[in-house]
């Protein structure tokens, strides 16, 4: 009788640990459709602002956005352009932060 209780308890614990292990993990790595649309709008806004900046108009700057974080990459001709591009990107609506990976030519 005592062994039956121990075995039942162990089986229950095993089942519980299996259920907990199968529970879904955080899906924070995926964007919702709304976040994707917001990020697309932010990217378009930042690209337009960069094209409107006279010193950045001819620069080779790529813009990507993920969950409001804008990443700038590519090449510019001066260090001042790197700073200007960051400022322009930060000023766009919806931008949470800017990761600047721009390099000098």
Image (spheres, helix red, strand yellow):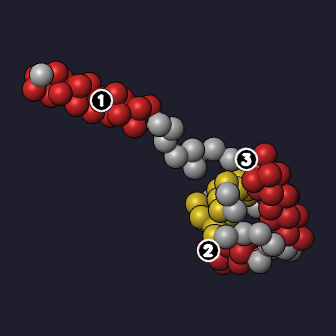
The reply, left or right, for residue 26 in relation to residue 2 is right
Quadrant, the C terminus: bottom right
Is 35 situated above or below 10? below
- Measuring from the top left, give residue 54's x and y in whole percent: 86, 74
Q: Give the quadrant of residue 94.
A: bottom right
Residue highlighted by disc 1:
12
- Measuring from the top left, give residue 68's x and y in whole percent: 69, 62
Pointer 3 or 1: first along the chain: 1
Residue highlighted by disc 3:
32
Which of the pair 12/71 is nearer the observer?
Answer: 12
At horizontal 75% and vertical 53% (from top left) the residue drawn is 35
- Measuring from the top left, give residue 6's x and y in whole percent: 15, 28
* Image marks 2 and 1: residues in contact by CB distance under 8 Å: no
Is 54 situated above or below 17? below
Quadrant, the N terminus: top left
Pointer 3 or 2: first along the chain: 3
Q: Report whether residue 53 is seen.
A: yes
Q: How many C-alpha atoms fall within 10 Å of the one at disc 1: few (<14), some, or many (≥20)?
A: few
Q: How many C-alpha atoms fall within 10 Å of the one at disc 2: few (<14), some, or many (≥20)?
A: few
- Helix, strand or loop status at disc 3: loop
How many numbered discs sit on the rendered protein? Answer: 3
Q: Give the CA distance from mark 3 to mark 2.
A: 36 Å
Pointer 2 or 1: first along the chain: 1
Residue highlighted by disc 2:
79
- Helix, strand or loop status at disc 1: helix
Which of the pair 86/59 is nearer the observer?
Answer: 86
- Helix, strand or loop status at disc 2: helix
Q: Report whether residue 85 is seen.
A: no
Which of the pair 19/34 is nearer the observer?
Answer: 19
């Amino acid at each position: 009788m005592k062994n039956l209780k121990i075995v039942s308890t162990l089986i229950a614990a095993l089942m519980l640990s299996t259920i907990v292990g199968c529970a879904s993990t955080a899906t924070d790595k995926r964007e919702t459709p709304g976040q994707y649309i917001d990020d697309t709008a932010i990217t378009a806004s930042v690209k337009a602002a960069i094209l409107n900046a006279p010193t950045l108009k001819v620069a080779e700057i790529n813009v990507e956005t993920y969950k409001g974080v804008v990443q700038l990459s590519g090449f510019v001709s001066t260090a001042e352009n790197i700073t200007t591009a960051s400022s322009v990107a930060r000023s766009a609506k919806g931008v949470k932060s800017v990761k600047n990976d721009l390099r000098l030519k």
